[in-house]
C-alpha cells in the first residue's frame, strides 16, 4: 500500500522569537505580543492551531526563534512542539542570522530525516562577490539571514531543501522621498545579488540531477513593484532560472501565474497606516526541480479569506489571521 504524499510547508511566523524567553520557554500569558493587537498566549495558540491543521511532515519556519549566546532556535521550537503535541516535534537550524529571525525546519522524525548540509563555495555563511552598481567592481555580499541547506530523506527518497528569507527592499529609516528611493534601489541591488548567489547554488544541484526544493519568503515576486522595471526582472525569476532551458528551471505555479496573468494569488497581508487598509502580496514560494514537478505535486496557500476550506473553519480562519501576517504554503509531493 502506497503512503500518502509527503507534505512540506513554508511559513513566515511574524515575531515568533518574541514568544519565548532565553531558556526557550513559552511566554503563554496575556501580555501584548509584538504582533499588533494580539497577546502572546493567543499568538502561540493560533500558531499551534494552524500547524496542527496543516499536518505537514516538514515545515520550513521563516522568522524562527533566535539563536545567539543565550537562546537557541531548536530548543524553543521543540519545546513549542512538545507543549502543543505537534507531529513535527524535531527541529534543525543552520548558520546563525544577524537578526532575531532564523530559518529553521521542524519535522516528523517518524516520516523523514533532515540535517543541515551546507554546500558550495562560498558557503552561505561566507562572502559572495557581485557587481551591484555595474561599475565593473564586484562588491562583497553577506546575507543577513543565511539560507538553510538541508539533506532530507523520506521513504527512501533523497531531497535537497533550501530555506530562504531574502533581504527586504523596504526603505527603512528613510527621512524623505528621495532618500527612500535611494535606499530602495540599494536594497533592490542587494536583494538581487542574494538571488544570483542562490541561483548559482540551484544551478549546481540541477546539473548533478538533485531533487531540489527552494522554499521561503523572497520579499519579492514577478510584477511586485516599480523597481523590477528598473532592473528588468525579479529575484524570484532569477532563482527560478526564467529564460533558461526547461531542464535548468525551477517551478512554482503561483509565480508562474504571476508571470503569465494579471491575476495572482497572495501569501501575505499587511496593514498600511497611510491608506488605512490592508494590502496583499505574493511573497512566499515553494519552487521545485523538473524531476519533482513531473511527480505532479499539489500546492496550496492557506489563505484565511481566499481558500474555501480555511474560510469555512472559523477556528482555523481566526488562527491564521492571529498567528502571522504571512500565510503558509504547502506542497503535497508523491514519493
Image: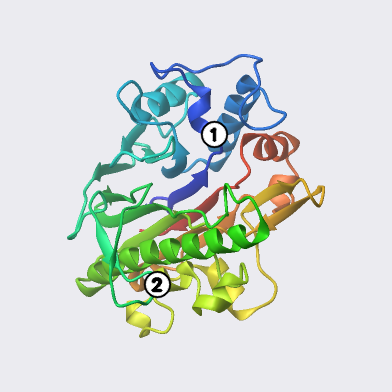
Q: Is the residue 234 above or below the residue 245 in the image?
A: above
Q: Residue at x 59, y 63 (%)?
A: 181
Q: Secondary structure at mark 1?
A: loop
Numbered disc in front, either 1 or 2: 2
Q: Residues within 10 Å of mark 1 (few under 14, many from 20)?
A: some
Q: Residue at x 38, y 16 (%)?
A: 23
Task: Name the image quarter holding residue 108.
Answer: top left
Task: Name the image quarter holding residue 244.
Answer: bottom left
**Would you name the residue on which mark 1 appears?**
15
Disc 1 + disc 2, Cβ < 8 Å: no
Task: Name the image quarter holding residue 210.
Answer: bottom left
Q: Residue at x 54, y 34 (%)?
A: 15
Say left or right for 65 vs 274: left
Q: Residue at x 34, y 76 (%)?
A: 135
Quick one: 181 or 12, which is closer to the camera? Answer: 181
**Would you name the residue on which mark 2 appears?**
133
> Residue 74 shows which numbered tag?
none
Quick one: 239 or 126, which is closer to the camera? Answer: 126
Q: Residues within 10 Å of mark 2 (few under 14, many from 20)?
A: few
Q: Is residue 220 visible?
A: no
Amino acid at each position: 500500500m502506497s503512503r500518502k504524499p509527503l507534505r512540506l510547508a513554508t511559513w513566515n511566523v511574524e515575531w515568533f522569537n518574541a514568544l519565548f524567553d532565553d531558556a526557550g520557554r513559552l511566554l503563554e500569558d496575556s501580555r501584548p505580543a509584538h504582533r499588533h493587537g494580539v497577546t502572546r498566549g493567543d499568538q502561540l495558540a493560533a500558531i499551534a492551531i494552524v500547524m496542527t491543521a496543516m499536518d505537514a511532515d516538514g515545515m520550513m519556519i521563516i522568522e524562527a526563534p533566535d539563536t545567539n549566546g543565550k537562546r537557541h532556535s531548536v530548543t524553543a521550537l521543540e519545546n513549542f512542539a512538545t507543549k502543543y503535541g505537534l507531529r513535527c516535534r524535531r527541529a534543525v537550524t543552520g548558520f546563525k542570522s544577524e537578526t532575531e529571525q532564523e530559518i529553521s525546519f521542524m519535522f516528523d522524525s517518524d516520516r523523514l530525516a533532515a540535517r543541515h548540509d551546507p554546500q558550495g563555495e562560498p558557503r552561505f555563511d561566507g562572502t559572495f562577490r557581485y557587481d551591484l552598481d555595474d561599475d565593473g567592481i564586484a562588491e562583497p555580499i553577506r546575507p543577513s539571514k543565511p539560507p538553510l541547506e538541508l539533506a532530507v530523506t523520506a521513504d527512501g527518497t533523497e531531497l535537497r531543501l533550501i530555506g530562504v528569507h531574502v533581504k527586504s527592499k523596504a526603505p527603512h529609516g528613510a527621512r524623505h522621498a528621495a532618500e527612500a528611493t535611494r535606499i530602495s534601489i540599494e536594497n533592490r541591488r542587494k536583494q538581487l545579488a542574494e538571488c544570483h548567489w542562490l541561483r548559482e547554488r540551484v544551478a549546481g544541484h540541477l546539473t548533478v540531477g538533485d531533487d531540489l526544493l527552494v522554499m521561503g519568503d523572497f520579499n519579492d515576486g514577478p510584477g511586485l513593484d516599480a523597481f523590477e522595471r528598473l532592473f528588468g526582472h525579479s529575484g524570484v525569476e532569477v532563482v527560478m532560472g526564467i529564460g533558461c532551458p526547461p531542464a535548468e528551471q525551477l517551478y512554482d505555479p503561483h509565480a508562474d501565474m504571476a508571470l503569465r496573468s494579471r491575476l495572482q494569488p497572495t501569501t501575505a497581508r499587511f496593514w498600511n497606516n497611510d491608506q488605512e487598509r490592508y494590502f496583499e502580496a505574493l511573497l512566499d514560494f515553494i519552487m521545485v526541480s523538473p524531476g519533482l514537478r513531473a511527480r505532479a505535486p499539489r500546492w496550496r496557500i492557506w489563505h484565511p479569506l481566499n481558500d474555501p476550506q480555511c474560510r469555512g473553519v472559523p477556528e482555523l480562519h481566526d488562527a491564521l489571521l492571529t498567528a502571522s501576517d504571512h500565510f503558509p504554503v504547502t506542497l503535497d509531493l508523491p514519493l
